[in-house]
Amino acid sequence: MRTLYVAWWNVENLFDEERSPRRSDKLTRVLGNDLRGWTPELRDRKISQLASVIAQMNTGQGPDLLGVCEVENEFVMQELAAAINTLVPDRTYQVAHADTSDQRGVDVAFIFDSALFTAPIDQIFQHVVMRRTGTREILQVNFQNVQGRTFAVFANHWPSRRGGHMESAAYRATAGETLAYFHERTLEVHGPDTPVLVMGDFNDDPFDTSLTQHALSTRQRKKVVNATTTHPLLNLMWPLMGTDDHTDPDATNDGTARPAGTFYFENHANVFDQFLVNENMLIDRAPLRADPASVHIFTGTPGMVGTGRYPVPVLFGGMGKPVNKDGFSDHYPIAMRIRETG
């Protein structure tokens, strides 16, 4: 039996350099002066900082599968994968990425160890979240493990709360409906026993209706495994709500305050970054079985957690914010373990 380590991270505006030849004229106009002063050296420093965290996951072995969001293009993803590979040379990381129609040009993507998974090109899909203005599509990759089993993974970066929580809620409800629809389609196409893992920055907490009513997620395992007419998802983040004791159990406790969420806004901790799984990752006979007790916020790298009154993430900055070359992202990564049993 093998244990897989899976992670997710909103890496906050991992953009290519200011005058990148890989950026379209349209996106250059949209970004305007936001990238002023974003040199290749700053881009590479941010990549190095992110890689230093990712490489320390899984007791220094790096993740087997990592989902990310807020990356501009495949180039920065390939650079990030290469930087992690340098720190964890036993890995053979590859990238699964697709350009989205997001107005600001940020994508969702995966880094995965090709010794454990393949990502067939015809099994990489983008699902459009219909709204009046462009937003990130949901990225679905039907990975194949070494046994040839399909493992469907959805990466999400749902519409932001810009303009207000309630005013923007309908956009995230639409994203939830889109996710639920393609979860159902996956089971129809690949078979009712297909394991499905959903990860992402949902810009909502587990209790918000976009997740509970529209994405059909719940905190009750029995509702998932006993469902007969729908295909609900178990949201694995519920046990972390309202507690500040859920950082990496493998990390050394250095006395730093432990975060109560993955993202802080106005000193309030939100659990916007989440894992959800379907019935086929919960039942006893599951070949890929989620370990709910393993879910944690990863803060095992020194300097990730702010030293003020609230344990906020230490930002790298850019895009109009002051740059801290020793920073990382405005979100904390999350991680979990999956037991693979043949």
Image: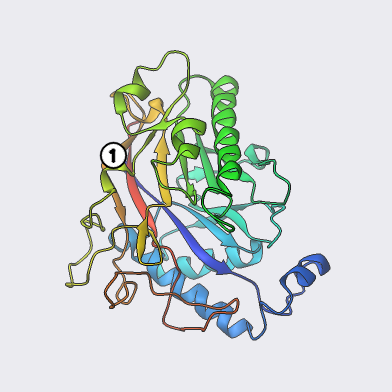
Residue 86: image location, x then y, percent: 46, 70
The quadrant of the picture occupied by the C terminus is top left
> In this figure, which colouring scheme has been used for the structure?
rainbow
Q: Is residue 46 visible?
A: yes
* Camera-nearest residue between 138 and 89: 138
The quadrant of the picture occupied by the N terminus is top left
* Camera-nearest residue between 160 and 95: 160
Q: Say above or below: 333 vs 228.
A: below
Q: Is residue 146 visible?
A: no
Residue assigned mark 1 = 291
All told, the count of numbered labels is 1
The residue drawn where x is 74% and y is 79% is 19
| Relative horizontal placement of residue 280, taking residue 254 as reference (left or right) | right
Say which amino acid is labelled 1: Asp
The residue drawn where x is 35% and y is 52% is 335
Residue 129: image location, x then y, percent: 66, 41
| Relative horizontal placement of residue 184, taking residue 314 as reference (left or right) | right
- Regarding mark 1 in the picture, which secondary structure is present there? strand
Furthest residue in direction top, as rendered: 228
The residue drawn where x is 31% and y is 42% is 238
| Relative horizontal placement of residue 158, taking residue 315 as reference (left or right) | right
- Circle 1 packing at 10 Å, graded few (<14), some (14-19), many (20+), is some
Residue 66: image location, x then y, percent: 46, 53
Residue 203: image location, x then y, percent: 49, 52
The residue drawn where x is 53% and y is 41% is 154
